[in-house]
């Protein structure tokens, strides 16, 4: 019998533009409770929310008032509420939030909760953009320090890679080596910036690592910043890199797809990438650059 996992992605616009940060958080949480109910009604066994789902993408400005949205993981109110909802719906949840590890130590984090409501662990975003107007993440977050965990669930082995992480293939490979079968990438990205990469990079990760990918992007514009249109188009792709389900560009949506996890073994029997990879030969990949932006020379082979 095939291993079929019914998975869902939720994309949504800001529920209360321009409001007080905590009021915006409350409105977004309330909005997502209804969307989670829809996912459950459609039979989803696993559901991933968008990046920093409980609020707007506040990294469009640099203002310490947004620090007040950070909360402990798993002991904050949002994760506790989502544990209750996971238990109610019998659904594994991937919940991206703003995490406060301690006063002044904040992360862009996704908690993973199993269908019983048990907290399985968290992933902290590794790669933080701070190079484009409107994406000032290093003001708000410390780079992730928990590696690239894979979470065993009843419905498959789940990995998480958050937004800007998707531009870096190294972590995507780490997730594959750790046994991930479905990798979720909750994001917040706007038209005119990385849209041309949206349907290139993540299908490429799926092909190179032979797993399913669920890519999520929010929708609409967010006042008062209006840094651009969050263009939605959340999607699932299979281990062959084929997009098998795609959401709209401009509206709130719950995207549901059936993922046949047996396809992973089928593809790996055809393309033995893990057998044929040569980690012994990749000497430069993990080497830091020097201050001039060059890889330190070994003193050998220089001509």
Image: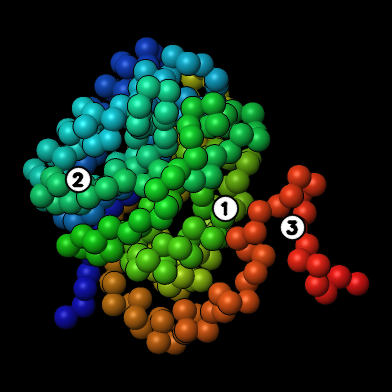
Q: Which residue is mark 3?
A: 295
Q: CA distance from mark 1 to mark 3?
A: 20 Å
Residue 112: percent from the left, percent from the top?
A: 26, 48
Point out the tag, 1 or 3, that comes first from the N-terminus. 1
Residue 200: percent from the left, percent from the top?
A: 56, 60
Asked if marks 1 and 2 touch (Cβ < 8 Å), the reply is: no
Please report the residue visible at 23 percent of the width from the left and 54 percent of the height from the top.
Answer: 46
Residue 126: percent from the left, percent from the top?
A: 49, 46
Point out the tag, 3 or 2, that comes first from the N-terminus. 2
Q: Residue furthest bottom?
A: 270
Q: Which residue is mark 1?
A: 167
Q: Is residue 154 above or below residue 93?
A: below
Residue 103 in the figure: left or right of residue 76: right
For the question of whether residue 163 can be seen, the reply is no
For the question of whether residue 43 can be seen, the reply is yes
Check residue 119 in the rendering and tell me which mark sits there, or answer none.
Answer: 2
Q: Residue furthest right?
A: 303
Residue 197: percent from the left, percent from the top?
A: 59, 53
Q: Is residue 6 above or below residue 47?
A: below
Quarter holding the C terminus is: bottom right
Pick whichever, 58 or 251, lies toward us: 58
Q: In terms of secondary structure, where does tag 2 sit?
A: strand
**Number of marks present in the image shown:** 3
Residue 192 in the figure: left or right of residue 73: right
Q: CA distance from mark 1 to mark 2?
A: 28 Å
For label 2, the crowd category at 10 Å Cα-Cα, with few meaning under 14, some 14 to 19 and many 20 or more, is many
In which quadrant of the rendered view does residue 21 lie? top left
Point out the tag, 1 or 2, that comes first from the N-terminus. 2
Pick whichever, 41 or 262, lies toward us: 262
Check residue 77 in the rendering and tell me which mark sits there, or answer none.
Answer: none
Please report the residue visible at 74 percent of the width from the left and 50 percent of the height from the top.
Answer: 290
In which quadrant of the rendered view does residue 156 lie? bottom left
């Amino acid at each position: 019998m095939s291993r079929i996992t019914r998975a869902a992605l939720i994309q949504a616009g800001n529920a209360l533009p321009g409001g007080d940060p905590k009021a915006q958080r409350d409105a977004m949480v309330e909005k997502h409770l209804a969307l989670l109910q829809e996912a459950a009604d459609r039979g989803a066994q696993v559901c991933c929310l968008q990046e920093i789902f409980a609020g707007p993408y506040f990294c469009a400005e640099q203002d310490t008032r947004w620090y007040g949205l950070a909360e402990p993981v798993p002991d904050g109110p949002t994760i506790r509420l989502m544990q209750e909802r996971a238990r109610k719906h019998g659904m594994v949840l991937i919940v991206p939030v703003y995490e406060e590890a301690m006063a002044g130590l904040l992360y862009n984090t996704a908690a993973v909760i199993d269908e019983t409501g048990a907290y399985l662990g968290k992933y902290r975003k590794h790669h933080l953009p701070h190079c484009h107007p409107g994406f000032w993440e290093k003001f708000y977050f410390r780079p992730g320090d928990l590696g690239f965990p894979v979470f065993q669930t009843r419905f498959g082995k789940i990995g998480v890679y958050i937004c800007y992480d998707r531009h870096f293939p190294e972590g995507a490979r780490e997730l594959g080596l750790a046994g991930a079968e479905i990798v979720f990438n909750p994001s917040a990205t706007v038209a005119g910036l990385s849209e041309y990469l949206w349907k290139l990079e993540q299908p490429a990760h799926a092909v190179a690592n032979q797993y399913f990918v669920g890519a999520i992007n929010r929708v609409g514009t967010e006042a008062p910043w209006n840094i651009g249109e969050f263009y939605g188009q959340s999607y699932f792709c299979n281990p062959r890199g084929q997009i098998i389900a795609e959401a709209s560009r401009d509206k709130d949506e719950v995207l549901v797809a059936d993922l046949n996890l047996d396809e992973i073994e089928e593809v790996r029997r055809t393309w033995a990438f893990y057998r044929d990879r040569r980690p012994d030969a990749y000497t430069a990949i993990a080497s830091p650059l020097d201050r001039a932006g060059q890889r330190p020379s070994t003193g050998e082979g220089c001509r």
